Amino acid sequence: MTSSLEPEDINVRLDDIDTRLEEVGDQLDLLRTIQDANRRETRGNSQTVARLERTVRELSEIARLHQEGLRVAQRDAERDRQVFQEEIRRIWEYLRDRNGGSSTPN
């Protein structure tokens, strides 16, 4: 019984298998490199997201404080306006009473 494969055919096939295994190894190395780069990028993105979240919280606090300041300023302005109007009314009444109840001086 003779083998249908000659030794030369076996060597060619083994060389082909070796070549294909090297190609698969190279592809695996490339995939590992890509995976490592993806891990680094994901870690960087996570850090960036954390910084953005902190910034958004800070901006929210600033906006809240700004709104509070505006409410206080509006309240103070309204109080000042009322005080000013009362003072004008008091002066007007003083001048009116001084002129004997007449709205225009004699």
Image: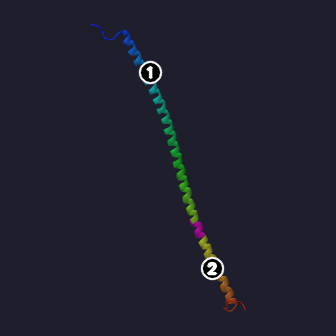
How far apart are the alpha carbons under marks 1 and 2? Answer: 95 Å
Residue at 51%, 49% (x, y): give it. Answer: 53
Q: Residues within 10 Å of mark 1 (few under 14, many from 20)?
A: few
Please, what is the three-letter code of the amino acid marked with disc 1?
Answer: Glu
Q: Earlier in the sequence, mark 1 or mark 2?
A: 1
Q: Position of residue 40 (x, y in %)?
A: 50, 36
Q: Which residues are magenta?
A: 71-76
Residue 16 placement (x, y as % from top left): 41, 18
In this rendering, would 15 be left or right of 89?
left
If the image is split into quadrants, where does the C terminus sit? bottom right
Q: How many C-alpha atoms fall within 10 Å of the one at disc 2: few (<14), some, or many (≥20)?
A: few
Tally the numbered discs. 2
- Check residue 56 for magenta coloring: no
In front here: 16 or 43? Answer: 16
Question: Closest to the observer: 19 or 39?
Answer: 19
The residue drawn where x is 61% and y is 76% is 82
Tell me the element at label 2: helix
Q: Secondary structure at mark 1?
A: helix
- Residue 22: mark: 1
Q: Return the residue at label 2.
A: 86
Q: Quadrant of residue 76?
A: bottom right
- Name the residue at 36% across, 9% down: 7
Tell me the residue at 42%/18% (across/down): 18
Q: How is the image coloured?
A: rainbow
User: In the displayed structure, would residue 31 be above or below residue 81?
Assistant: above
Q: Position of residue 3 (x, y in %)?
A: 30, 9
